[in-house]
Image: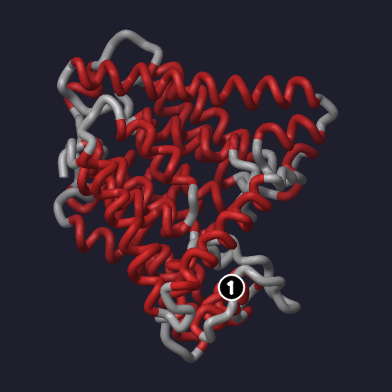
């Protein structure tokens, strides 16, 4: 019998508020002590340049990095109030709230309750904690991605398109998810996506001092910044890790194999879902998030917060081996990475943060096995509704 205090579905808004507050309390003291790091300093420089009518993608000053996000992102960041402590607090709260809202809604929609729901929330909070301490925007990105996926599960294509377009304003990664939304489901997903993107990128931004004439130049600069970033492959994607291990041929084969299998899984599952008049199984989105991390040349430790709701998807499976597989992936993705894991038990492969891509690969493998199976008991019983 479930205890009522473990039934997180009874009051979703209160649960979201509580989990968000817990995430902020765990990270804000350290963030405020350190002050802005190179990430938030980069955002501040870009926002200030855009406000002054200058190019936010120009060579950064000392203490900042090259800005590589949409002009709308710089504009939105400029609206965060001063002083610095207040700005950092609001920025942390925004990132925490976005991810926690998506996580709690997914836990509820999956029917996950009792100790399993607490485990899913706790493991996701560990992943979020790692991301928040870097002061990056990955909490927002993960929240928008998974809220869009949840709306798509409820066959709310318009809402899914809106959430994913907001994610696109943060990073370009959500564009990969839109391939599943175009076909064979309702095209209104794309209509709303492009409409929202147009408002964000071509209507809002022109009202800054650059004027309408400077908007095209801004987006051209953004495209060039993305092209430079795509050429970087020195972090935690599968190709880079295998290449550094001295296996360049295997690295390229793994990269192409993950991309091909993921594409086939998306096509096969969406077609089956369309024929059966149902939503795609939740594992499809967990597979997509893991593939993005394994294939993106910009994957780094705080980016793996994209996997946080994927752990809940696996813990909601009826098969015991899949639940334990999800726990194992979450363990390597979160606990092993933190100081909770004794240093005396650290292995050589942990020095390069390999536990993170290892967790993503395990999630990817488990989801491929589920999507490749012939039964759909779980999808029929627990298609999320919002």
Which residue matches tag 1? 56
**Residue sitting at the far top:** 374
Instruction: Report the label total.
Output: 1
Quadrant position of the C terminus in the picture: top left
Front in this rendered view, residue 182 or 341: 182
Query: What colouring does the structure picture have?
Result: secondary structure
Q: Is residue 299 left or right of residue 152?
A: right
The x and y percentages for residue 257 are 60, 20
Q: In the rendered view, tell whether residue 121 sits above or below residue 43.
A: above
Front in this rendered view, residue 111 or 202: 202
Q: In the rendered view, tell whether residue 208 sits above or below residue 263.
A: below
The x and y percentages for residue 45 are 60, 78
Quadrant position of the N terminus in the picture: top left
Q: Residue at x 54, y 66 (%)?
A: 217
**Residue sitting at the far front:** 213
Q: Quadrant of residue 136?
A: bottom right
Q: Residue at x 59, y 74 (%)?
A: 55
Q: Is residue 166 left or right of residue 7?
A: right
The x and y percentages for residue 15 are 25, 59
Front in this rendered view, residue 6 or 308: 308
The x and y percentages for residue 128 are 48, 56
Residue 111 visible at all: no
Residue 146 visible at all: yes
Q: Is residue 80 left or right of residue 301?
A: left
**Residue sitting at the far bottom:** 83
Front in this rendered view, residue 339 or 84: 84
Q: Is residue 32 left or right of residue 251?
A: left
Q: Residue at x 46, y 72 (%)?
A: 213
**Residue sitting at the far right:** 246
Mark 1: give few (<14), some (14-19) or many (20+) Cα within 10 Å. many
Q: Residue at x 31, y 50 (%)?
A: 194
């Amino acid at each position: 019998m479930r205890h009522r205090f473990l039934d997180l579905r009874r009051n979703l808004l209160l649960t979201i508020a509580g989990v968000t507050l817990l995430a902020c309390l765990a990270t804000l003291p350290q963030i405020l002590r350190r002050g802005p790091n190179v990430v938030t300093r980069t955002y501040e420089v870009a926002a200030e340049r855009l406000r002054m009518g200058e190019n936010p993608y120009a060579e950064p000053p000392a203490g900042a990095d090259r800005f590589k996000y949409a002009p709308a992102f710089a504009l939105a960041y400029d609206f965060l109030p001063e002083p610095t402590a207040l700005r950092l607090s609001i920025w942390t709260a925004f990132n925490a709230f976005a991810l926690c809202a998506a996580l709690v809604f997914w836990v509820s929609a999956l029917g996950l309750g009792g100790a399993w729901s607490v485990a899913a929330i706790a493991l996701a909070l560990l992943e979020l904690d790692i991301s928040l301490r870097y002061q990056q925007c990955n909490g927002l990105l993960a929240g928008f991605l998974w809220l869009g996926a949840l709306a798509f599960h409820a066959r709310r294509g318009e809402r899914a398109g809106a959430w994913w377009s907001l994610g696109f304003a943060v990073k370009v990664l959500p564009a990969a998810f839109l391939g599943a939304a175009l076909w064979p489901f309702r095209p209104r997903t794309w209509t709303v996506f492009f409409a929202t993107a147009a408002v964000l990128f071509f209507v809002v931004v022109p009202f800054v001092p650059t004027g309408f004439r400077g908007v095209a130049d801004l987006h051209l600069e953004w495209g060039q910044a993305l092209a430079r970033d795509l050429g970087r492959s020195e972090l935690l994607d599968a190709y880079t890790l295998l290449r550094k291990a001295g296996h360049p041929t295997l690295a390229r084969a793994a990269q192409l194999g993950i991309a091909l299998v993921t594409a086939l899984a998306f096509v096969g599952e969406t077609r089956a879902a369309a024929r059966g008049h149902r939503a795609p199984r939740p594992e499809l989105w967990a597979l997509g998030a893991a593939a993005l991390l394994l294939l993106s040349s910009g994957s780094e430790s705080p980016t793996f917060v994209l996997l946080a709701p994927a752990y809940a998807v696996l813990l909601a499976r009826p098969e015991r081996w899949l639940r334990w597989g999800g726990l194992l992936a979450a363990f390597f993705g979160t606990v092993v990475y933190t100081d909770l894991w004794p240093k005396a038990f650290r292995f050589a492969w942990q020095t390069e943060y390999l536990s993170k891509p290892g967790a993503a690969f395990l999630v990817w493998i488990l989801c491929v096995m589920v999507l490749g199976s012939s039964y759909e008991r779980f999808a029929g019983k627990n298609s999320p509704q919002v």
